[in-house]
Amino acid sequence: MPAPSQPRGNAVVEVRHVSKSFGDREVLVDFNLDLFERENLVILGKSGTGKSVAIKIMVGLLKPDSGTVNVLGYDVPTLSTKELNALRLQVGFSFQGSALYDSMTVRENLEFPLKRNLGIYNRSELDEKVMSALKDVGLESASNLSPAELSGGMKKRIGIARTLILNPKIMLYDEPTAGLDPVTSSEINELILSVRDKYNTSSIIITHDISCARETSDRIVGLFDGRNKVEGTFDELKKQNNEELKPFFNY
């Protein structure tokens, strides 16, 4: 489990009264959330409860039907494409499927955001940044492998490395342990904690894995039927006799 929380710093994400529907289906209903500096915040909920929609709204991939979204001082729904791109350089998004390019080696996958987003083409600088990112996730030896040669856990690590290489202020993890065995899941949880410690990131971790929530969270928001109905530390939520939490805590 993470170290005891320090006094909260400034909020880096503020979501207020956000609602989002797709046709007649309400996905988020009056959703509220704060994320503070160097905090690991878990959004816990079953599949299909709006967790991934919530973080897509935070980076402007989706627009809310109502409500306000402020990330690192940006009023996200009002941003132009240029402003959104500037924000996204500061927000790392670790996708559930790792989102690696199959036609590229690991090295080329990590070089891609450096070239596209930062205009870095100098070979020595690219090598330094790539190997540093791979070292941070414990995979220095994988630089010349293709994604097809990687295990599920390795793909997750490389996906995180590709995100870290731009030195983001906020990390968004979408189901980081999905499809992994318990040992590999625990390794990914430890990596999430080490990323926060080394990069001083604030993180939102989307999961339905209670072990991931226990091991990585400073605070948990329970999202059910599109509403954030419960909030607290892991131990606080475990003590609550909440019907919607029972499937997670195995009451």
Image (spheres, rainbow, N blue to C red):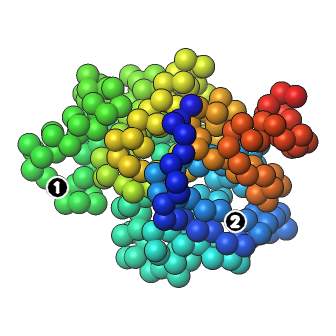
User: Is residue 248 rendered to the left or right of residue 198?
Assistant: right
For the point 21% across and 34% down, which residue is it? 131
| Vertical position of residue 169 compared to residue 24: above or below | above
Label 2, residues with CA under 10 Å away: few <14, some 14-19, many ≥20: many
Q: Most extreme residue toward the front, as rendered?
A: 7
The foreground one among 115 and 137 is 137
| Vertical position of residue 192 compared to residue 63: above or below | above
Q: Which mark is residue 32?
A: 2
User: Is residue 163 rendered to the left or right of residue 207?
Assistant: left
Determine which residue is flagged by label 1.
120
Q: Quadrant of the N terminus?
A: top right
For the point 37% across and 76% down, which residue is it? 82
**Image coords of residue 14 (percent x, y):** 58, 68
The quadrant in which residue 96 appears is top right
Q: Does any portion of residue 21 appear in the rendered image?
A: no
Distance from disc 2 to disc 1, alpha carbons, whole Å, reads 38 Å
The quadrant in which residue 5 appears is top right
Q: Quadrant of the C terminus?
A: top right
**Image coords of residue 58 (percent x, y):** 56, 64
The foreground one among 70 and 87 is 70
Q: Amino acid at mark 2?
A: Asn
The foreground one among 247 and 81 is 247
Are circles 2 and 1 on residues that touch, CB within 8 Å? no
For the point 17% across and 55% down, which residue is it? 120
Q: Secondary structure at mark 1?
A: loop
Q: Amino acid at mark 1?
A: Ile
User: Is residue 88 rendered to the left or right of residue 109?
Assistant: right
Q: Secondary structure at mark 2?
A: strand
**Image coords of residue 124 (percent x, y):** 8, 43
